[in-house]
Amino acid sequence: MPTLKLDILVIPTYNVKSLGIADASVYPTDPAVVVSPTIEITPPGFNMISLPFVPEDFNIFTSSTLGITYPLDELLPLPDGVYFLKYSVFPAHIDFVERSIMRVDQIQEKFDNVFMRLDMMECDRAIKTQAKVDLNTVYFFISGAIAAANNCAIVEANKLYIQANKMLNQLINKNCGCSGSNYLINF
């Protein structure tokens, strides 16, 4: 008979307005020990909220369920940053699992928009090459922020996220200098 081993997985929803957490726990079959399953979620900049958690299922959380907006308000994008998660079953002080994760859905959406804009621009080859190098660097910083948060290096995760966001904003605000004459002169 298996012993209780709690585990959770944060699953991408590809939606800035939702957070998906799946139960990946192993539960004993007899006796059932799933008593009062709860998850504590602390979004960046907000207080911790304790919510019911459905075992052996995929749980979706929004700005409303996380206490960021009122239930009748329009759902807002969840903030990017480090989230602290704690899944527990009764008694909570004995059986629990904790995670810290870096949510990057909003910056990923911004990255995707810059990437798509780059592919559609009519710039000369050198400018496009530099923009691709810059985007690769941004992607590296985003990946580093995720890795740091997964390993409880919260300060480093936030530094990497801020640097990625700063570089993306510079790419968005940068005018590549494209004009019809650039194309004619170089080709």
Image (cartoon, grey):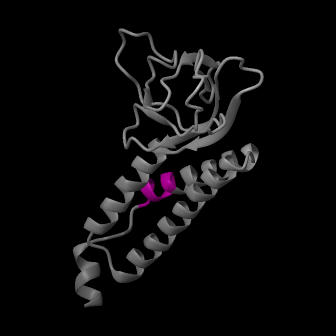
Q: Pick the quarter of the image with the N terminus.
A: top right
Is residue 28 a member of the stretch shown in magenta?
Answer: no
* Residue at 60%, 32% in the rendered image: 28
Image-based side of 145 in relation to 174, left or right: right
* Residue at 25%, 79% in the rendered image: 181
Foreground pick, 60 / 160: 60
* Residue at 54%, 57% in the rendered image: 167
In the image, residue 32 sits, relative to residue 23, either above or below, namely above
The percent coordinates of residue 99 (x first, y second) are: 66, 38
Task: Report the magenta residues as a range.
Answer: 168-174
The percent coordinates of residue 166 (x first, y second) are: 57, 51
In the image, residue 142 sits, relative to residue 66, either above or below, namely below
The percent coordinates of residue 13 (x first, y second) are: 39, 41
SS assignment for the magenta stretch, majority: helix
Is residue 169 a member of the stretch shown in magenta?
Answer: yes
Image-based side of 105 in relation to 1, left or right: left
Foreground pick, 115 / 83: 83
Image-based side of 97 in relation to 186, left or right: right
Q: Pick the quarter of the image with the C terminus.
A: bottom left
The percent coordinates of residue 106 (x first, y second) are: 45, 42
Q: How many marks?
A: 0
Instruction: Give the quadrant of residue 178.
Output: bottom left
In the image, residue 11 sits, relative to residue 166, either above or below, namely above
Instruction: Give the quadrant of residue 143.
Output: bottom right
